[in-house]
């Protein structure tokens, strides 16, 4: 049975005095039904029937119960919560993240992670709004169709030609990065006798440049 509550209507006031006190009681003998607002709020959440996923529920208000049973989110009445669902592929790699009903219109925000033929991270897509989804896994072709009209909304790395899988270039999301040669580049410099680096020393109150050190 849900906990009983006593609610005072707006404008209620009581002034205490020497010979007056206020006591409020709940009459358990009354046959009235429980306040429906005391019952857990139930929201539809549809997760993928097969495959691996992790659901994280983050209440935004104090709550004694927050769980998902048979595809429905059960949480205390008048309690808001963020529901995040991470889907994984057969290799245990993150594939899709769904933030259920997080937009002002209660639509989902979905982001996608793709992989190349060697199993390395490929395109990382920006979140896209999907309506009427209720936390379900969004097929890749359907997800990409929701990005129609957006200029290449994904970031991607360029790997070196070696089994080490090191990233040489990282492109941010958007056509301006992709088509104008604007990656963040990483270069490794091997140490040799002709390579020098600045050498600094630390005194009691400052850092002092000494020389170039080999």
Image (tube, grey):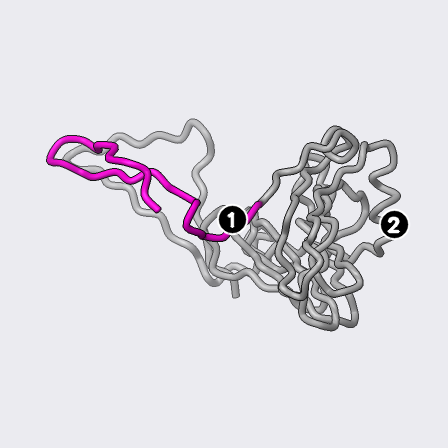
Q: Which x, y percent locates residue 46?
A: 76, 60
Q: Which residue position holds label 1? A: 189
Q: Which residue lies under the disc numbered 2?
A: 142
Which residue does the image show at 68% across and 50% down from the upper left?
A: 100
The magenta-colored residue range is 187-214
Figure quadrant of residue 206: top left
Residue at screen point 46% across, 56% down: 4
Which class describes the residues within 10 Å of circle 1: few (<14), some (14-19), or many (20+)? few
Q: Residue furthest left?
A: 204
Nearer to us in this view, 33 or 103: 103
Q: Is residue 77 magenta?
A: no
Is 33 placed left or right of 43 in the picture?
left
Mark 1 vs mark 2: give the one in front.
Answer: 1
- Where residue 125 sits, quadrant-wise, is top right
Q: Residue furthest front?
A: 194
* Horizontal side of residue 18 vs 51, given as left or right: left
Q: Position of residue 163 (x, y in %)?
A: 67, 66
Q: CA distance from mark 1 to mark 2?
A: 44 Å
Q: Secondary structure at mark 2?
A: helix
Label 2 Cα crowd, 10 Å radius (few <14 / some 14-19 / many 20+) = few
Residue appearing at x 66%, y 59% in the figure = 86
Image vertical order of residue 212 relative to residue 119, above or below: above
At 74% from the left edge and 67% from the top edge, which residue is drawn? 89
Q: Identify which residue, 3 or 48, lies in the foreground.
A: 48
Residue 168 position in % (x across, y down): 64, 48
Name which of mark 1 and mark 2 comes first in the sequence.
2
- Of the pair 163 and 198, the residue shown nearer to us: 198
126 or 37, which is in the foreground?
Answer: 126
How many numbered discs sit on the rendered protein? 2
What percent of the width, then of the height, locates residue 182? 68, 32
């Amino acid at each position: 049975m849900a906990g009983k509550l006593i609610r005072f209507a707006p404008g209620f006031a009581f002034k205490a005095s020497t010979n007056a006190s206020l006591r409020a009681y709940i009459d358990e003998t009354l046959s009235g039904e429980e306040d429906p607002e005391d019952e857990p709020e139930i929201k539809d959440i549809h997760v993928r029937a097969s495959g691996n996923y992790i659901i994280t529920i983050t209440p935004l208000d104090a709550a004694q119960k927050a769980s998902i049973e048979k595809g429905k989110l059960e949480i205390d009445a008048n309690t808001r919560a963020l529901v995040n669902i991470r889907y994984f592929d057969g290799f245990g790699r993150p594939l899709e993240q769904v933030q259920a009903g997080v937009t002002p219109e209660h639509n989902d925000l979905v982001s996608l992670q793709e992989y190349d033929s060697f199993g390395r991270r490929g395109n990382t897509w920006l979140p896209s709004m999907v309506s009427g989804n209720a936390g379900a896994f969004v097929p890749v072709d359907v997800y990409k169709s929701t990005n129609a009209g957006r200029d290449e909304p994904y970031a991607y790395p360029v790997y070196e030609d070696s089994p080490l899988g090191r990233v040489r270039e990282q492109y941010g999301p958007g056509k301006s990065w992709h088509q104008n040669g604007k990656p963040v580049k990483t270069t490794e410099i091997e140490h040799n006798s002709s390579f020098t680096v600045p050498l600094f020393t630390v005194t009691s109150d400052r850092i002092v440049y000494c020389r170039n050190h080999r």
